[in-house]
Amino acid sequence: MPAISKDLVNHISITEADAGARLDNFLIKILKGVPKSHIHRIIRAGEVRLNKKRAKPTDRLNEGDMVRIPPVRTAEKQRPSEKNAAPAREFEIVYEDDAMLVINKPAGTAVHGGSGVSFGVIEQIRRARPEA
């Protein structure tokens, strides 16, 4: 598999191993981490060329074809760091045994993170009780 620069235009010659593949599937394989919708968008916009001509996502590749791939940048996945991690917090415990924990959750506190909320009760309890 050829090395792909995500900052420069790439020209890739199709090998026997990739012959017969659809253009969109080939690009999905080559451009790891790039969403399929973005790949289809750059093909439709004419940025991806097959033998110096516009191509369709369904075009089949032949051995020796030249594919022009424009610079494609992807957002790097952010890993949770200690700074962004949920703060450890204990909540008022109503009932606890080996299988269940019932807490008095304050109003307005999210149960778990998502949709703009970084963390919730679940993440805070896990942080406060790593052994549980």
Image (cartoon, helix red, strand yellow):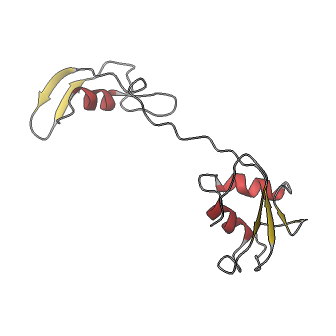
Residue at 79 percent of width and 66 percent of height: 67
Closest to the observer, 84 or 113: 84
Task: Please tell me which residue lies in front, 41 or 10.
Answer: 10
Say whether residue 68 is left or right of residue 1.
right
- 72, above or below 94, in the image: below
Would you place residue 49 above or below residue 84 in this image?
below
On-image quarter of the N terminus: bottom right
Q: Quadrant of the C terminus?
A: top left
User: What residue is shown at x 21% (from left), y 26% (from top)?
Assistant: 103
- Residue 116 rendering spot, x and y as whole percentages: 52, 29
Outermost residue, left side: 97
Q: Is residue 95 above or below residue 76?
A: above
Q: Is residue 24 left or right of residue 118?
A: right
The image quadrant that residue 25 belongs to is bottom right
Q: Residue at x 76, y 76 (%)?
A: 60
Foreground residue, 21 or 68? Answer: 68
